[in-house]
Amino acid sequence: MSTQASLVLLVDDEYDLCLVMQMALSRIGIKTHIAHNLAQAKHFFNEYQYQACLTDLNLPDGSGLELVKYTVQHFPNTPIAVLTGFGNMEIAITALKAGAFDFVAKPIQQQQLQQMIQRSIRPMMPALHQPRLPEEQPLIGQSAEIEALRHAVKRIAHTTTPVFIGGESGTGKEVVAQLIHQLSHRRNGPFVVINCAAMAEERIESVLFGHQKGSFYGANQNKQGLFASAHGGTLFLDEIAELPLGLQAKLLRALPEQKIRPLGSDQEIALDFRILSASHQNLETLVQQGKFRHDLFYRLHVFDLFLPPLRQRGHDILMLATYFIEQLCLEWGIAQKSLTEHAQKFLLGYHYTGNVRELRNMIECALTRCDAEQIDLIHLQTTNPDKIHRDHPTINHDAVSLIHPNRLEPASSSAIPEEGLQLFLLRVEREILLNTLSITRWNRTLAAKKLRMSFRSLRYRLKKLGLDHE
């Protein structure tokens, strides 16, 4: 097989159009081969190594979608885009789900063609000369759902297809987004996370797109937005459902051509990033309710992944618990610990409304009070009694009610803590803070309001209890 740098295959039965595209790409130093049908394109793929491919949707001897699937299966490192005269969103989604990295409608402008091909080639070049990096943050678990998720992540990582990640709060949506980035050709670029639920509505546009000096009161200097910070890498929009409708429209304009206009500027900035998004809410339901734009939904929801709740993942729970124990013990510089059989049964029977995040918090709390070699039930009993199986024979429910923040009624003398009142109250305070922060998804401002304290007081208490790193 011959190898040629910056070589692109153009597949279209319109001879004149192919020549126009060939000349446009030659102006930016990209060489091209031209195929006029499906059979010829497959033959070229077996003879040359291409850095990208652009195919028409309708070919004389078949569909461009067939070439997309063929390329994804046999030449997964070659990005392929689809060109069509029918600007249909359903066709675009079909092409992208088949593995195409982009979708463009005829007539395509020369500058648009050049930018699209450059975007596809630029991330590929390092991968041709560098060894593949190992997975830095693998998905923990062996359940059927996680195995399927792991396979899907590896399959879509090499594309530029927008991916929506759904699932309850705390299931690990950001972990999956980060893994997609780490396995992609953009791994050496930035991974920028935007929590759409944590930004003040009046400042969101400035935070996302940046602003020019003097564009609003307090804008004392030019500032780059988070979109620009993601140039060359991946942009992860977490809790995308929280975006106001007005900003959804501006986001929709920025995504197709990847151009933004900072506040106060009359110049657009061209960027190169991949979009990943996530929400614990059902976007289709929000679309039906008029709370989320239909067109933005299709732009973001090209390929979707779903993370199952932790309570449905069986023995993955113990694998995750062991992983957290090993990581925290290593981080804190303490001896490694294990779980007793009773503790394992307890964790398997627990109802995790906070999912993986709640399990990690439980393990962290247990390690702070465990001086033995094994974590036992007594170290896990600061959790919500409503989530514990009441018929569990080894649980001291008086002790549980004693230290649960909503059940501080007197308990039996046998449940009085041995460490003394001061340490006991610190444990109670820590548990109340963790429960409240879990409910507010670690929104500290909202947590302070629920606890009827100032934000500064909450921040001091989190620092005192070693929780300010979360």
Image: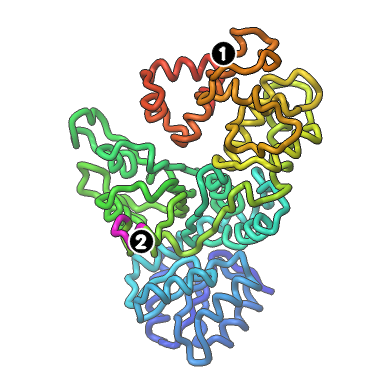
Find out whether the residues at labels 2 and 1 contact each other: C-beta distance under 8 Å. no
Name the element at disc 1: helix
Q: Which amino acid does label 2 sit on?
A: Pro
- Residue at (57% x, 45% y) in the render: 172
Say which label, 2 or 1, has the lower sequence index.
Answer: 2
Residue that mark 1 sits on:
425
Name the element at disc 2: helix
- Residue at (44% x, 19% y) in the render: 459
Q: Which region of the structure is painted magenta?
A: 286-291
Q: Closer to the camera, 405 or 449?
A: 405
- Residue at (42% x, 70% y) in the render: 103
Q: Closer to the camera, 268 or 247?
A: 247
Image position of 74 (left or right of 199): right
Q: Closer to the camera, 299 or 311?
A: 311
Up the image or down, 399 lies above or below 114; here it is above
- Residue at (38% x, 50% y) in the render: 241
